[in-house]
Amino acid sequence: MPYVNIKVTREGRPEGKGPSAEQKAELIAGATDLLVRVLDKKPSATMVVIDEVALEDWGMGGLPVPEYRARKARDA
Amino acid sequence: MPYVNIKVTREGRPEGKGPSAEQKAELIAGATDLLVRVLDKKPSATMVVIDEVALEDWGMGGLPVPEYRARKARDA
Amino acid sequence: MPYVNIKVTREGRPEGKGPSAEQKAELIAGATDLLVRVLDKKPSATMVVIDEVALEDWGMGGLPVPEYRARKARDA
Amino acid sequence: MPYVNIKVTREGRPEGKGPSAEQKAELIAGATDLLVRVLDKKPSATMVVIDEVALEDWGMGGLPVPEYRARKARDA
Amino acid sequence: MPYVNIKVTREGRPEGKGPSAEQKAELIAGATDLLVRVLDKKPSATMVVIDEVALEDWGMGGLPVPEYRARKARDA
Amino acid sequence: MPYVNIKVTREGRPEGKGPSAEQKAELIAGATDLLVRVLDKKPSATMVVIDEVALEDWGMGGLPVPEYRARKARDA
């Protein structure tokens, strides 16, 4: 009875659109298949929860993602 | 000093209404009472955080909840 | 299909004994009952995960729990 | 490669304003610096995720935060 | 820069053996591939954390997993 | 009343030693100070939970940390 939590950034502006409903359905199907394939878990007992995280709420390299990406683009 | 996280689906459409503020207060009171009763914890040191999860962000049986419920209703 | 995570300190020394298996079963039953009672959720779709956290891994008031408790006892 | 999750209440009404983007950037920088200073972790491998939690979704002392604060103010 | 957390039961007795290191490596590779395939995320920015949960710490249907499984086997 | 969760790898072999109790106390103090400084939160209402994650349970770049580090060292 696995539990999988997937956190991804909510992309797009100004409201943020995140991944589409279709992409979320693919993440749910794919994560469930993975547990079935590797550990022989039952799909009916596998829970997946997706969290969309606003860009300003996610940090990498000590910076919010928008600044982090801008710095990486500048340094590339 | 327990910490309890309760994740539930946000029900209702199109915006989603989730559980009401009254129901959330009941969840908070009930979870705190449970820790007091079973483990003799102090209410003042017990934190409860409720997350409402959009239906398309929650998966069971490899499907987003709306499709999962539709399939269960069809198979019943 | 709720998901409940309960974090409690692992008490006892030197290995830590945490809550007993019986107390954990009570927490699982109680949390499930709460979701059934308040939100009419199905027990079969309710997942509960308990985490025991070592005392040195839990902080309150800026201190690990053992120091926090010692300070509270001293100040009482 | 640490992962830090910071949950804070979303303050302000009626929509809730939470901490500002500047304050979030300070939390991300500060949490990353902390891991660098104490455990010599690399900033580039340190992820920080901030969750703003609505006041009615956070409980202390068995009450949602608004009622908890009102009671504390009354008892002070 | 996704973050994936996978919680699975620690199986085997008396100490519990959980999934093997090889199975964990497959879960990490598979979860990363999923994010690359569906959302075009970079593997280098994808973090996966696996938690093994003791059977007595996981509840379904209001029961710890061992009792839940015994009941399901009896009812089958 | 913030809640901070810090996940770090448990380093050292064969049992794993993770960060020391002193380092954990520094993480707890530092995370609490950060919330006080940036958001004027009260230390007494700030909870910090540290999780040590075994190297084989943490993945980056699609690999468990030991393989990921070996590859980075080889490519450096």
Image (spheres, coloured by chain):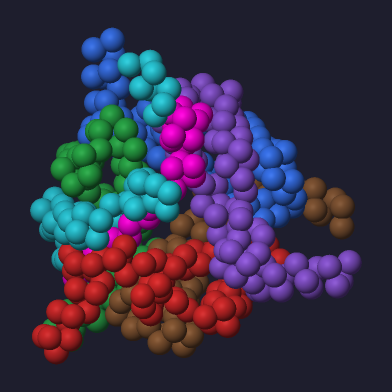
Chain colours: A blue, B brown, C red, D green, E purple, F cyan
Image quadrant in which you'd find residue D29? top left
Residue D76 point in image, percent of width and height: 13, 84
Q: Residue furthest top?
A: A76
**What are the residue bounds of the magenta stretch?**
F44-68
* Residue F74 among those drawn in magenta: no
Left/right placement of residue D24 relative to residue B22 reads left
- Give the quadrant of residue E31: top right
Q: Is residue F64 magenta?
A: yes
On the rendered image, what quadrant is the N terminus of chain D found in? top left
| Residue A43, percent from left and from top | 73, 48
| Horizontal arrangement in the rendering, residue E14 relative to residue E75 (left or right) | left
C66 up-or-down from F14: above or below: below
Task: Decide: is D51 above or below C75.
Answer: above
- Give whichever of A28, E29 is nearer the camera: E29
Whether residue B33 is visible: no
Give how far across and how far down residue F9 sits, in percent: 37, 45
Q: Closer to the camera, B53 or F16?
A: F16
Give the tally of numbered discs. 0
Residue sitting at x 48%, y 73%: B27
Nearer to the camera, D57 or D16: D57
Q: Residue at x 49, y 44 (%)?
A: F57
**Residue at 32% from the left image edge and 33% from the top image edge:** D45
Residue D16 is left or right of residue B66, and the answer is left
Q: Residue at x 28, y 29 (%)?
A: D44
Relative placement, left or right, of D26 versus B43 is left
